[in-house]
Structure formats: structure tokens, C-alpha cells
Amino acid sequence: MESKIGIMLDLPDDKLPGFYAQVVKALAGKAQLFDRDKEMLIVSDEEQQQAVLDIMAHYKVETEIMALCLVPDDAELTDLFNDYGFISRSEHAYLYESLIRVFRLVPANERADAASAKQQMDEHLLAQWNADGLDTFVVDRQLEELMHGIAKAYRCQIEIVL
């Protein structure tokens, strides 16, 4: 799981049709985009973010910055995913970091029943994947306490990743 930076553009309605193309051309020479989706530009670091912001300031385009989580390509996305993220033109899945909690389920002792805990958590999951041999889960940030409670009931613990 990688963190990315989303830059949402608020393009003026009163500009000529070629305005967006002009902005994109300016970006091509000065900023390295990781991805894009409609009016969101996605970059990998703060240096690229600043390059984009400088160009947007030049063209007087309002922006909004948001932290994104790039979901691994092999992740299983649930029906709830679209309320917390999006899939870009390049087919990459992203989640809005401010809305989610990413965690791993860890057995607390030899009597732990991680399979049952996961089964009870399933209805709340937005996405899940295996990273380094460990299952990683994503839920709504407000459900963190519930996930801790379920884990405890089955003698497991939650290890917060993000």
C-alpha cells in the first residue's frame, strides 16, 4: 500500500474549451503525474505536488489536496468501496485516507480464532489484500473501535497500518 497525493482541480466554467488542454500541456513539461482521473491529478510526492500547484497558480485554477491510498492491484474490493474511493482511468484503485482505517488481524494467543473474527468483519470491509503473507483489511475510520471489539472477542488483536 502506497500513499499518493490527489490534487482536485476546480476548473473555471467560463474558460474556452482549449483551456484544459493548455493546462495539461504545461503539466507535461514540469510535473510528473503518477495518474489522473477526471479533474484529479495524482502525484507521488510533495515535490511533484508543488510543481502541479505552481502551474495551477499560474493558470489561476483552484485546487484541493487530499491524501490517497493506492490499493494493491490484487486487492479484493467490496461493494462499499465506491463510497470511500475510486478507480482511475489507468485502472488503479484509490481510497481517501481521511475516511479509512487500514489494519491487520493478529492472533493474541494460540486459542485465537482469526478466521471467525474475519468472517464477522467481512460485512464492514471496503477492501482486503495479502501483503508480505499477512491479510490487510480496510474499513470506515469510524468502525475502528468495532474492529477492536470483534478481534478481542475472538482472542485477536488489531494492528493499525494506517
Image (tube, grey):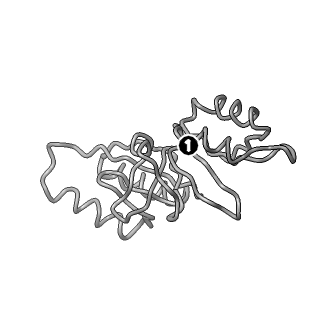
Residue identifier under label 1: 122
Question: Please, is residue 48 above or below residue 82 in the view?
Answer: below
Q: Which of 88 and 49 is in front in this view?
A: 88
On the image, the x and y values in percent for residue 63 come to 38, 44
**In terms of image quadrants, where is residue 93?**
bottom left
Rendered residue at 15%/48% (across/down): 15
Rendered residue at 19%/56% (across/down): 19
In this picture, residue 58 sits left or right of residue 148 = left
In what quadrant of the picture does the N terminus appear?
Answer: bottom right
How many marks the image carries: the answer is 1
Give the crowd class for mark 1: few <14, some 14-19, many >=20 residues within 10 Å.
some
Rendered residue at 39%/50% (across/down): 86
In this picture, residue 141 sits left or right of residue 78 = right
On the image, the x and y values in percent for residue 119 come to 61, 43
- Residue type for callout 1: Asp
Q: Nearer the viewer, residue 63 or 44?
A: 44
On the image, the x and y values in percent for residue 22 come to 23, 62
- Mark 1 lies on a secondary structure that is helix
Q: Which of 98 and 118 is in front in this view?
A: 118
On the image, the x and y values in percent for residue 60 come to 30, 46
In this picture, residue 126 sits left or right of residue 160 = left
Rendered residue at 25%/46% (across/down): 11
Question: Please, is residue 155 above or below residue 87 in the view?
Answer: above
Q: Nearer the viewer, residue 61 or 118?
A: 118
Residue extending farthest to the bottom is 29
